[in-house]
């Protein structure tokens, strides 16, 4: 994602890469960040977060929850806005980030793709129209290196469907089926996870009724789609001082 973001920034005449961060000990530290995309830009990869934030407008973060929390704390101290594409946060971490948004502006979304954002809108419409007569199943697939499951995007899709149906996802979600499970519980929302190869990200929500089913699918062919969305989010934050926002805000879908 770091390389995809640098490529997207290089294509934006209104954008400038201010810094590039890696973990301490990374072999990339000290190298020209642009070398990683075949276009040297004079920005050295570093590990000093405080120095990286000095003079920056926004930090784009695709890391892990514990790393994002530390980055958000530093952004708050430096007055730098934040775009969060990280997934896997627990409830306490989400609450902390929401409170942090009182001091800086944050765009946080489990998936920065414009297409996924539109899909979420379509899911809300479909769930409201189809109602309780249709069973809901969510299937997601990602590469072998993804460490959290189900994906943050799949969970967000479940939240959108549950809210549209007046349900509580925490009570209705079913994450594992094995053995003699009995009949499907009415009102449940099932999740299935696939991990393998280099799958960038596929998500399908199935509304299964009697005699028909409706499927809404999004397939990502390249991480560039996430980078493009993150750049739109960064532009959206320009001039904003506080507040928690998501990609629906960025795209004006509220």
Image (cartoon, helix red, strand yellow):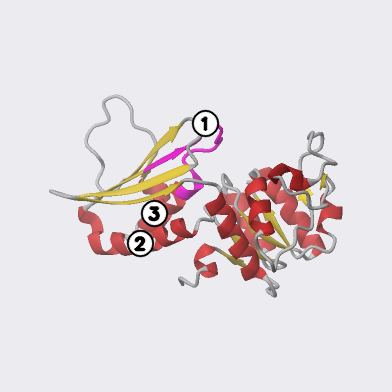
SS for callout 2 = helix
**Taking 64 as reference, is 115 left or right?**
left
**Taking 6 as reference, is 173 left or right?**
left
**Taking 245 as reference, is 194 left or right?**
left
Q: Is residue 180 above or below residue 41?
A: above
x and y, in percent, of residue 132 in the image: 24, 56
Residue located beneath label 1 in the image:
144
The region drawn magenta spans 139-153
Mark 3 or mark 1: which is in front?
1
Mark 1 Cα shell of 10 Å, populated few (<14), some (14-19), many (≥20): few
Residue shown at 77%/50% (left/top)? 20
Q: Earlier in the sequence, mark 2 or mark 3?
A: 2
x and y, in percent, of residue 40 in the image: 78, 49
Residue shown at 49%/38% (left/top)? 149
Residue located beneath label 2 in the image:
122
Residue shown at 56%/35% (left/top)? 147
Considering every residue shown, the one lying at the far top of the view is 179
- Tell me the CA gap for discs 2 and 3: 19 Å
Asked whether 247 or 76 is in front, the reply is 247
Residue located beneath label 3 in the image:
168
- Tell me the CA gap for discs 3 and 1: 30 Å
Mark 2 or mark 3: which is in front?
2
Q: In which quarter of the view is residue 116 placed?
A: bottom left
Q: Find out whether residue 149 is within the magenta segment.
A: yes
Identify the main secondary structure in magenta: loop
Q: Earlier in the sequence, mark 3 or mark 1?
A: 1
Residue 203 in view of the camera:
yes
SS for callout 1 = loop
């Amino acid at each position: 994602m770091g390389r995809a973001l640098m490529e997207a920034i290089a294509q934006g005449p209104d954008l400038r890469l201010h810094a590039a961060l890696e973990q301490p000990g990374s072999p990339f530290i000290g190298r020209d960040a642009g070398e990683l995309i075949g276009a040297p830009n004079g920005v050295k990869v570093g590990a000093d977060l405080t120095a990286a934030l000095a003079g920056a407008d926004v930090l784009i973060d695709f890391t892990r929850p514990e790393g994002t929390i530390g980055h958000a704390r530093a952004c708050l101290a430096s007055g730098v806005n934040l775009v969060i594409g990280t997934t896997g946060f627990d409830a306490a971490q989400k609450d902390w980030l929401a409170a942090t948004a009182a001091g800086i502006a944050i765009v946080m979304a489990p998936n920065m793709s414009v297409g996924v954002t539109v899909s979420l809108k379509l899911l809300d419409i479909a769930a409201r129209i189809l109602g309780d007569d249709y069973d809901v199943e969510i299937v997601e697939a990602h590469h072998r290196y993804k460490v959290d499951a189900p994906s943050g995007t799949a969970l967000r899709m479940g939240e959108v469907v549950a809210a549209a149906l007046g349900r509580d996802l925490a009570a209705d979600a079913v994450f594992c089926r094995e053995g003699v499970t009995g009949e499907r519980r009415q009102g449940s929302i099932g999740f299935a996870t696939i991990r393998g190869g280099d799958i960038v990200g596929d998500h399908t929500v199935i509304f299964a009724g009697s005699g028909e089913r409706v499927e809404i699918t999004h397939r990502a062919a390249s991480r560039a789609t996430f980078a493009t969305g993150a750049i739109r989010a960064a532009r959206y934050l320009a001039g904003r001082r506080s507040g928690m926002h998501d990609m629906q805000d960025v795209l004006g879908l509220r």
